[in-house]
Amino acid sequence: MGKPLGEFIRAKRDSLQPESLGLPDRGRRRSPGLRRQDLAARAGISVEYLTRIEQGRDRNPSAAVVDALADGLGLGPAERDHLRYLARITAEGCSVRARPARPSRQVRPSVLRTLRLLEPGIAAVTNRLGDILAHTSGYASLADGTGLLDADPPNLTHYVFTDPRARTFFTDWDAIADEQVFDLWHAPSVENADWLTAELAPVAGPEFTSRLHRHPVPRHGTLRLTHPAGYELRLLRETLELPADAQQLVVLLPADEATARAVERHHHPPEGRLRSLS
């Protein structure tokens, strides 16, 4: 997946205006954002060393250097965590196999029982690749007519970038696209993420690849949906991490009374039982 640490630092430099960090305006620059020499000075390292990091020629900067770069870029907590994560996987030298194996789609029986307790609410078990591994009838009802569950197996990341209906369904499509790409960096392994990107990049195009190398850190705000049935929905997202399985249990809750009423009108009690896609 390229030179993630250097790409992230460069992307953040390009997005910063020197004035926002209290630096003087030095007039016209050949490239946008914060100059490399300014960041090096703020971080207390040499320009040559910063260049090596950005170009992927130095793959093991110390924790102190990583923290100094975070300070120099004025990163918030989520971005700092991501910078440290990228530094770690860069130092580990994550080599990618020619055709990495797809991660397991199995969901533990106890997790499935937990999911049943949430019926008929809107909930699903996913992983950071976007695979939808199991879901409640409420989730299936919400997805009805959107195309989200049409693929076999369904994958939210693939849907967001390749199905035109996703751009209507997700009111804030750009924010959702950023979230899905960001999660790839925190997938069960970099090899698994590369399995998906190898399949997705050729069909998703620059909307996907530009985000992959820009590392946008999402805010995970209220989920806004424009359902093809005519409903405008606002949903809160609660996520329970399942670290032993590298999976997440995601529960969607109405954020207001109008959404609660719309969900109630739209949902029809299922004839079958909980559907697992494992």
Image (cartoon, rainbow, N blue to C red):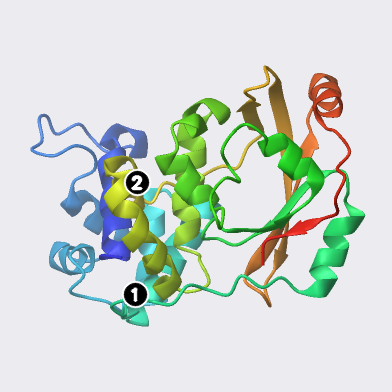
Of 128 and 270, nearer the camera is 270
Q: Is residue 171 visible?
A: no
Q: Amino acid at mark 1?
A: Thr
> Residue 214 at x, y = what percent?
32, 49
Q: Can you name the residue that lies furthest to the right here?
A: 117
> Residue 165 at x, y = what percent?
50, 30
Tell me: residue 266, above or below residue 128.
above
* Quadrant position of residue 16: top left
Earlier-in-chain disc, 1 versus 2: 1
In-image side of 51 versus 238 (left or right): left
Which label sits in the foreground, 1 or 2?
2
Of 178 and 17, nearer the camera is 178
The image quadrant where one finds the C terminus is: bottom right
Residue ID at (37%, 67%): 194
Q: Amino acid at mark 2?
A: Phe
* Label at residue 208: 2
Tell me: residue 184, above or below residue 221.
below
Q: Secondary structure at mark 1?
A: helix
* Label at residue 71: none
Residue ID at (50%, 64%): 186
* Quadrant position of residue 111: bottom right
